[in-house]
Image: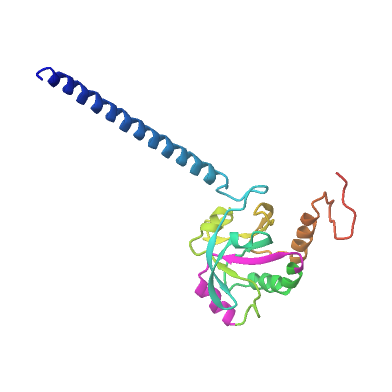
Amino acid sequence: MKSTGPIMLTLTLLLAASTAMAASDKVDGMTRATELMVQHHKGMVQSEPERAMVGEPAPAFSLEAVVNKEFKRVNLADYRGKWVVLFFYPGDFTFVCPTEIRGFNAAVDRFTELNAVVLGASVDSKFSHLAWINRGDLGDLKFPLLADNKKEATIRYGILDEKEGVALRGLFIIDPNGVLQYQVVQTPSVGRSVEETIRVLEALQTGELCPLGWKPGEKTIKK
């Protein structure tokens, strides 16, 4: 009976050591799993560029907007499967901007026929958008006006005029897979061409090589 003391002590020590090793292995396993999750998350984040780049996924956004005179949240992801024509303009209650908005508005049906949606955006608030619409400057607006008042999308699309605190006239065409295929940025003093936007959209939709000034019905360049 006296000899059982050391044996029991030894067994207890061995059991404690085994338990400690198992716990250590479990912690190491959890640590490794956490590292893998972090690496995977980083990989997902890096798959989308911080700034807009042609040929890369278009920067995502989720913004308040005025749609049919109502406030709604608009997400770029909502339009997956369609072409998106996204144009930024400097500001509400200005002079050149309403001519562009009315121009795109008049062509909404043509964009719809091309499986495309039009989105307008500025750094103004949704309340400013609604007041401008209600004043009658834009007519019966058929597409959303996005309110990027935090300037997050404007920065990600690389068109913030930091001196003035407004967006430049940036226009972006995003394909149905969410990839940015076209962008053009110009000074606020000059309005854009709706016809040129439609021409480029139609050219992109051919999936072929289109020469200078190509128009629908004309020959493309064989690959």
Front residue of 144 and 177: 177
Q: Residue at x 68, y 64 (%)?
A: 190
Q: Indicate whether residue 115 is drawn in magenta.
A: yes
Number of labels in the image equals 0
Front residue of 34 and 100: 34
Front residue of 59 and 197: 59
Q: Which residues are magenta?
A: 113-135
**What is the basis of the colouring in this image?**
rainbow
Give how far across and how far down residue 97 sits, in percent.
64, 70
Give how far across and how far down residue 57 sits, in percent.
62, 50
| Left or right of 24, for residue 220 | right
Q: Residue furthest top?
A: 3
Q: Residue at x 73, y 69 (%)?
A: 112
Q: Where does the N terminus fall, quadrant-wise?
A: top left
Q: Residue at x 57, y 49 (%)?
A: 51
| Left or right of 15, for residue 53 | right
Quarter of image, res 44? top right
Quarter of image, res 83? bottom right
| Left or right of 199, for residue 23 | left
Front residue of 33 and 108: 33
